[in-house]
Amino acid sequence: MTCHNGSHADDYAGPGLENPHPFPGADNLACTTCHGGNPQGHDRLSSHVAPPPEIGDREYQRTNAKAYFNKLTLTGLDKVADYSVDGVAYTALDYLQFVNPGDVRVAKANRGCGQCHQAHAECVYSSPLATASGFLSGATFSIGVDNQVPENRGLYEDTAADVAFRVIDDPRFRFSLNTVGAVRRLNEFPVYSKHNDTGPMAIHRNPAYDAANLTQHQRSDGRAVTDSPLANLMHEQIAFTCGDCHLGSAGANNRAGDYRSSGCTACHMPYSLGGRSGSRDPNVNKLEPLDPDDIDEPERPHVRSHKIRNVAKALPNGQTVQGIDDHTCAGCHQGSNRTVLQYWGIRLDQNQDLRNGLQYPANPVSFENTARDSKLFDAAVGNRTFNGRNANQYIAKEDYDGDGRDDTPADVHHEAGMGCIDCHGSHDLHGGDVNNPSANRTWSHMEQAVAIRCESCHGTLDAYAETTPNTTYAGTPADVIVDRKSVAQRHVARDADGSYWLTSRLSGRRHYVPQTRDVVVNNGKLHPTTGQPLYTAKASYAMGRDDGDPSNGLGPTQAGVPPDGFCHSDSMSCVSCHAAWTNTCMGCHLKGEYNTGNNFSNITGDRIVYKQRNADFTYISPLFFQLGINADNKITQISSNTKVFYQWRDRNGQFSRVFAFTDRKGLGNSSGIGALGHNVIMAHSIRGRVTPQNEGPRYCVACHLTDEGLTNYGTQYNAFRAAMATDDFAALDFNLLQTHFGRNPSNQLNSPLFVHMVAGLGSGVFLFNENGGPVNPLDTNPNRFGSEGVAPASNFNVANVALNLDKIVRPDGLPLSSNAHMLLAPGAGPNRRDGAPNPNMCGPLGATLIRRLTDPATGIVLNSWLDANGRNGGQAGTYVR
């Protein structure tokens, strides 16, 4: 501790047991044990390992953009050639280990964290968090190019992953029908844009990439030609725009909300919101970055403190050290679905449509931005942006129908004080069970690795949550719950009275976990802290079995219909009803350009000639959602998003045409009027009931026709349904659609048109032309992305419609949109996607379910229901007292 005595050492040792390592103080372990190094090199920059010449010291990074990028992001440090400084030889990993001993590339080599946590290191290195295999490989699938790993072609309905941040070769791999998604090998995501590259497929100065030449590289069915310039440009766009959210680097690491490290450290040693150090080390600059919203070379961000975090721990003095918090997760999981922000009850409004009164298809009655939300904008930090966006681009509350309730509320688990890690613990995050390495695999997609389910904690109608003997984090023997892979979750235990309790891994706070069966069945059980009955008649009606047996709950009984044993939970996921809102993005416009400035690869760290020109959304709304089939073969809410349009500006400043793609399965943009992509992303907006302040779950009218709804709107529904079935867009009443979709959260109107949209048959308000421009008479914004400076309402012509983006399936079950996921147990259970050519994949509802939901003549028309406010409706509405 000669150099850092009383600084890092004090932080590290901490009071009591603040550091989770099993030793009382830092003197038991030398700094070099983790950070590596050679004291001979210590005279350079006061470091144990001298930096490689191409990275250099701070002064060098001030003037060399490539050096600064790689030091800031850690992206290409493992690719540095062996080097010598002052007669001492070093490798790339020597320096990377000194900078961050938790980097996955270091830990995988049994160095740094990997010295003591080898099993974790093995799991994490090939986990989806580290490889980004799902996102990167999903992109190659979605544009229709062949799988880059020959032995993975055709595997798992051709959805097997093929690319990752770094090469993966898993010797544990053994093909089995019971391990859907597992692969042995992943290639490193290719980079074609390296500066001064002269290879035949290199982009630098290559006329093959001129805009006029790209059209020939798209097949007639919409797929990009494999290994073509067009396919390569899309690869580069994905890497530049989306390729830094993985544990293989520290990400952009350049603005408030994005500061983090790489590997183990990304989660276990959180950075501050503004990037400034909270350490007591006097050698660390406490004032950098000067501007938390825009770090400048040679500045670097810093950890909050030099203390490792995992689960909450009680100290001998009675204090509790917090576990890994949500801000740590938000560093990556605010992209795509904005999952952490949704969990907090915050919606992205990228275009500031609410502020400008241009929300489509209708403005809310009222809204509030996030200027007062300290989770995003902290007065002490002084940040003006979060992830590069201002307070007007993040919405805290919005009320579309004027009922005074927030239509985008926070998840109830967040409101209760729980964090992301209270559901997603070691097994989910590390990519496997560290106690059973032989069972771990390299997975293609997230849902194949994530094993936690709602039922893991809350049980089902028929059974309480499954438990196994184990010990809690406090070391107490207990019966703890298990996930779907039978891995013990040591923070949720059943006590002697049969009650389940969750001890938060975030805060250490104890939460009672109600069981579904106790809520649905009137067995007299009371909440152990409030003394209130757990049973509710509404829950019993919605989740019970309609068999006349009260021990199974009431069930969704209908007047004049004999009990038939139906139960929603037999075929539906919990989130189908309990997710209050979704993130819907319609029209994702990606534009790349040839650029010889200081642009660097998120994969290799090399200087490249590719730059993102635009990454824009046409429409974002919380009001739209569809039902589909998830990997568990359950009906669930899905998102009709990932509607990607691509355009390239070449070395001569010329723009290509706008491209939209068809996937490997021939879906998305192949023939007729397609819908591009959709995704089965679980909405993290769980609600239990409507309150005076917040909207609640999706009640019956959100997904079902009712006799009252057909009485009120049957004529309009018949006309709308016929027009949508025949693509007769001129027959649509857009003013009616504006009301029934734009001002109707969770179907307050009890509208059959809303049900049509939920079934995946479309709303009619997301029509687009072949260039990605919206086609409708409602939008008066001339600056709408894709509209080329002319408001859609001023240029409305149904003859221009080429895509109907939220009509993801036909009434006969034939899908019109793309997704890259398949069932975890193909062939098991009922076929819920009849009419689809690929029923073993996730996707839209099948013909039978669509008919039941949307056909007034042969489908299900409720005469008893819960309305959007959770109140009784219909003839048999006496079940709730």
Image: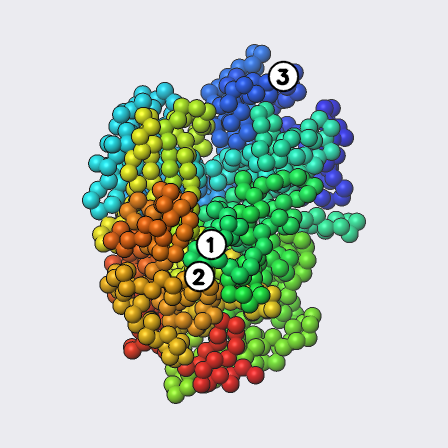
Single out the mark in the foreground, 1 or 3.
1
- Quick one: SS at disc 3? loop
User: Reading the chain from its start, which is encountered first: label 1 or label 2?
Assistant: 1
Q: Are marks 1 and 2 in contact (CB under 8 Å)?
A: yes
- Residue 175 as seen in the image, left or right of residue 339: left
Write down the residue under mark 2: 742
CA–CA distance between discs 1 and 3?
Answer: 56 Å
Q: Which mark is residue 44?
A: 3
CA separation in Å, label 1 and label 2: 9 Å
- Which residue is at 74% across, 24% downward? 2
* Residue 174 percent coordinates (x, y): 36, 47
Residue occupying the point 58% across, 65% down? 404
Image location (x, y in percent) of residue 534: 60, 75
- Say which element carries label 1: loop
Give 122 or 732, whichever is nearer the viewer: 732
Q: Label 1 sits on what residue type?
A: Gln
Residue kind at label 2, given as amino acid type? Gly
Q: Can residue 496 be seen by looking at this rendering? A: yes
